[in-house]
Image (cartoon, grey):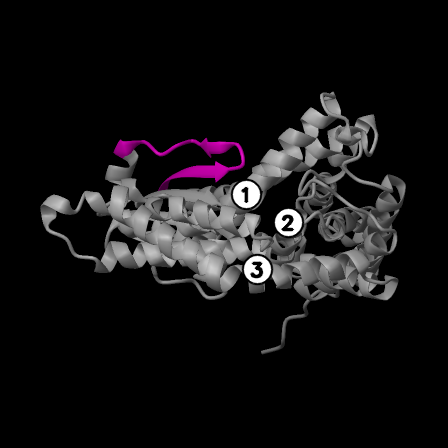
Amino acid sequence: MPAKVARVVAITACPTGVAHTFMAAEALQQAAQKLGWDLKVETQGSVGARNPLAAEDIAAADVVLLATDIEVNTERFAGKRIFRCGTGVALKQPEAMLRKALEAGVEESAANTAGATAKPVKGEARGLYKHLLTGVSFMLPMVVAGGLLIALSFVFGITAFKEPGTLAAALMQIGGETAFKLMVPMLAGYIAWSIADRPGLAPGMIGGLLASSLGAGFLGGIVAGLLAGYSAKAVSQYLKLPQSLEALKPILLIPLLCSLFTGLVMIYVVGKPVAGLMTALTDFLAGMGTANAILLGLLLGGMMCVDLGGPINKAAYAFSVGLLASQSYAPMAATMAAGMVPPIGMGIATLLARRKFAQSEREAGKAALVLGLCFISEGAIPFAAKDPLRVIPASIAGGALTGALSMFFGCKLLAPHGGLFVLLIPNAINHALMYLLAIAAGSVVTGVLYAVLKRDESALPMAVPERA
């Protein structure tokens, strides 16, 4: 009798919703095809949900696999077995993740799965880090819109927006005075949503707007989001009411109590110290000397290349994105430039040392070049997975050099994504030629280093069988 075909439904989602989301989905589909399993994957990327899961597919599934670095809504999976892992491990070990998913149990309540403690996979982000990435993910479109609108206002002159009634003033009003003001409330609100689901959203956004008005910036927004989220979760779990009054909790009691708690703590306890810390950080970044700028660029650039979309990479990226709200644009420039280096470097290496690479690797090198130009660091993952001890050090060397040069040249970037295509937006980046030089220098260093370090597979001696 033939074995039963396993049926799996999955969701993939990463903070930026650009690379890992789709690469993990493709890897899972290929692994499922190899195993002969029936797999349906919904990708929740920057363009919204693609291939949404049908109710009948969910009902027929043996297990739900959530390969996500951010929190996703799981109400539709009530009563189903759910297995959680990150996009990185799903990309690198798709078959293992599919097999582990079949061992998953049923989560307590789909209504309270935000921040649920399903069995974690070793090395994957959980807890506070995952909630932070969720907030950053929802904040990113606001950062992109605001930054590019501010850049467009500069087309008419750096100070043209100060003239009331002009188009430059209108663009600055939309981008700087509206979109950027919503960044911190969005960050805080969706951190709280990640922790407590929908009940945390209102108190989180209220706390985030308070953090912004108090001058506490993105650090204050993180604190507000955590306060709102965990307080909403606590009220939801521990405040017991008669069944007839339970419906009042999410629409009345949680918004009131948690907004009050978060607001008072932000105003009287957290706001001023965090605002002072944020001011000190902003002043340091604005006034740092050349040596400090180079060191910060080295650090951020190296972090972007350590794990190619993993926790260290995302920490550097989240830090730089958060600083945009405080008009600190130099770290963002260094971070994006360095993140482009590994895939471009791998592409250069395949061109410089063609004989050392198989035909499939040379094709992957061409794809990596294009992905690198788009600021998709994950384009280097196929090379790093196969040869990490050579690829990662070469990438770190090039990325650190690029980050340091970007800071040394005083490059400032108003948009958190887009790669070289951001250069098409006037004034999105200053010192564009020097910025390109920094990226080119780091990419060449990575490419040459890996071309030299890479073993020539065709030159390896053939194994000689031992005599009996």
How far apart are the alpha carbons under marks 3 and 1? 18 Å
From the viewer's perspective, is 75 left or right of 336? left
Q: Residue furthest bottom?
A: 468
Residue in the picture at 48% in, 57% down: 267
How far apart are the alpha carbons under marks 3 and 2? 15 Å
Helix, strand or loop status at disc 2: helix
The residue that label 3 is drawn on is: 311
Rendered-image quadrant of the C terminus: bottom right
Helix, strand or loop status at disc 1: helix
The residue that label 1 is drawn on is: 139
Q: Position of residue 265 (x, y in %)?
A: 43, 60
Q: What is the total number of numbered labels drawn onto the structure image? A: 3
Q: Earlier in the sequence, mark 3 or mark 2?
A: 3
Mark 3 or mark 1, which is nearer to you?
1
Picture quadrant where residue 7 is located? top left
How far apart are the alpha carbons under marks 2 and 1? 9 Å
Of the pair 442 and 184, the residue shown nearer to us: 184
Q: Are marks 3 and 2 in contact (CB under 8 Å)?
A: no
Mark 3 or mark 2, which is nearer to you?
2
Identify the magenta region.
Answer: 38-56
The residue that label 2 is drawn on is: 321
Mark 2, other Cα within 10 Å: few <14 / some 14–19 / many ≥20: many
Q: Position of residue 350 (x, y in %)?
A: 78, 48
Give amino acid for label 1: Met
